[in-house]
Image (cartoon, rainbow, N blue to C red):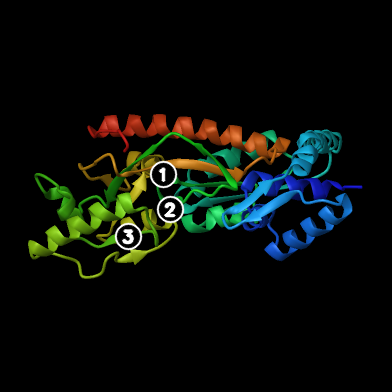
Amino acid sequence: MLEIRDLRLIVAIDEHGSLLRASRALGVAQSAVTRGLAAIEARLRGPLFERTGKGTITTDLGRAVLADARDILERMAGLDRHLAEARGSQIRDLNIVAGSYLAESLALTAAGRMTELYPQVRLRLTSANWAEVARAVLEREAPLGLLDLRGYQSDPGLEVEALRPQPGLFVVRPGHPLTRLPRVTLADIMAHPFAFIGRAPREVQAPLVKAREAARAAGALHPAFPALVHESPTVALNLVARSDVVVAVMTSLAARPLRQGEVVALPWREPWLCIRPGVLRLRGRPLGEAEQGFLDLLRDADARGEAEGRLICGELGLPADCA
């Protein structure tokens, strides 16, 4: 007799095409998957998968099991959702992991609405380096992850939903030397102390490095690059008023300090200065009510953030397109 965990293991191996990738999707060691599959095949008296150098191939016996396994798992997921609704008075936990820029913008906006619409859900929002988001979802530390897709290396165990691009800006304190230039170039910006996250997509790093070289050739360059490394854009924004640091930030995060005159946007922008947010989730894993609710709120926050970004860029006379 097969159990639910056996069916999940069989489906994972079939979907991911190897024991290693299935183990990553299930969040267990590969040795546990190997032992589990051997025990199942012993009970069924036949192999479910052929092992090859490139992965696994499902046998006729495996396909016979899979014909009903997915339907059974979907029914069980539906039962779990109904039970969760019936236990509506109980507190449920929901973990979300996001790259720092998106954790402090789109995810935080969705989290605020979540507390109103889902009062029985205890939400834990974790801000992480971009590189950690996919791992956290694969290892089932969080059912949903949010990151800039330009820095994401695709994984067969994950489904990806691309959201709307969010434009960014360079901001400085009022009275900053750059605000007195008749025309600002990226080399001018990179000659000053710059605050940035520890890891950024190549599409963003490359033009910054090229501009640094141009500033070096011009003979005016702040020696440290970046001058400040910090994963929180909000913290970097707070530093702007106290120094000559330049910060690259999403327009939605800069909206309030811009309108209150706490920071000034530099009159320079190109399409690569943006974030392309995306949501990661385990492939084939149905979302629960709270997870789906957060995802819907995230989509709404994303649409509003893009609209606000375009509005701010329009007010500043800057292009709002993203590449």
Amino acid type of disc 1? Answer: Leu
Q: Up-down: is 241 above or below 278?
A: below
Marks 2 and 1, the one that precedes in the sequence: 2
Are there few (<14), some (14-19), or many (20+) residues within 10 Å of tag 1? many
Q: Up-down: is 30 above or below 15?
A: below
Whole-angstrom CA distance, mark 3 to mark 1, is 15 Å
All told, the count of numbered labels is: 3
Residue 97: image location, x then y, percent: 58, 51
Are there few (<14), some (14-19), or many (20+) residues within 10 Å of tag 3? many
Q: Quadrant of residue 29?
A: bottom right
Q: Quadrant of the C terminus?
A: top left
x 76%, y 47%: residue: 8
x 12%, y 58%: residue: 214
Amino acid type of disc 2? Answer: Thr
Marks 3 and 2, the one that precedes in the sequence: 3
Tell me the element at label 2. Answer: helix
Residue 3: image location, x then y, percent: 87, 48
Tell me the element at label 3. Answer: strand
Amino acid type of disc 3? Answer: Ala
Q: Residues at badges 2 and 1 in contact (C-beta under 8 Å)?
A: yes
Which mark, residue 234?
A: 2
Outermost residue, right direction?
Answer: 1
Left or right, residue 289 beside residue 268? right
Residue 302: image location, x then y, percent: 48, 34
Q: Which residue is mark 3?
A: 195
Q: Which residue is mark 1?
A: 253
Q: Up-down: is 8 above or below 312?
A: below
